[in-house]
Amino acid sequence: MIQPRCQASFDRQAMMATLGARLLSCDAGACEIEAPVLDIATQQHGFGHAGLTFSIGDSAMGYAALSILPEDREVVTSEIKTNLLAPARGDRLIARGRVMKPGRRLIVVLGEVFAVTDGAERQIALLTGTMVPVDP
């Protein structure tokens, strides 16, 4: 399921559009985003760039946090730690974000990014972060 406000917000993100990303699900503190590994998002060895991994991971965690907030609130990223576990070898990446601890002032989130080749997933990154609820 995708909350309509999450989809509307996602659709306003030029960065996600540039990367060819799409929102697969977003509800109840969890979000999933998929992006192809396009030529514009590769590094010198032909793998997906860490910037692609971080970008979709950040957005998946942010939308997971947004999905638990009241309609009159938005969210911004405060900090993220990224552990790159393996090269982003694959046709596409999937980022899964989820809320670990909701709060009024801070929301702690976890993100995992997977490279997908022929339907098989391999985890390539683990992200932990903090999102801050804000007035729109």
Image: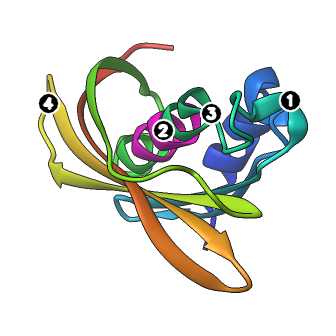
Residue at screen point 69% across, 29% down? 43
Is disc 2 in contact with disc 3, using a CB cutoff of under 8 Å? no
Q: Amino acid at mark 3?
A: His
Q: Amino acid at mark 2?
A: Glu
Give the spatial CA distance, label 2 vs label 3.
Answer: 34 Å
| Quadrant including the N terminus | bottom right
Other-residue count near label 4 (Cα within 10 Å), few / some / many at <14 / 14–19 / ≥20: few
The mark that comes first in sequence, 4 or 2, is: 2
The answer to whether residue 61 is magenta is yes
Is disc 3 in contact with disc 4, using a CB cutoff of under 8 Å? no
105 above or below 123?
above
Residue 25: where, in percent of width, then height?
60, 66
The mark that comes first in sequence, 1 or 2, is: 1
Q: Amino acid at mark 1?
A: Ile
Q: Which residue is mark 1?
A: 40
The mark that comes first in sequence, 1 or 4, is: 1
In the structure shown, which secondary structural element does the residue marked by tag 1 occupy? helix
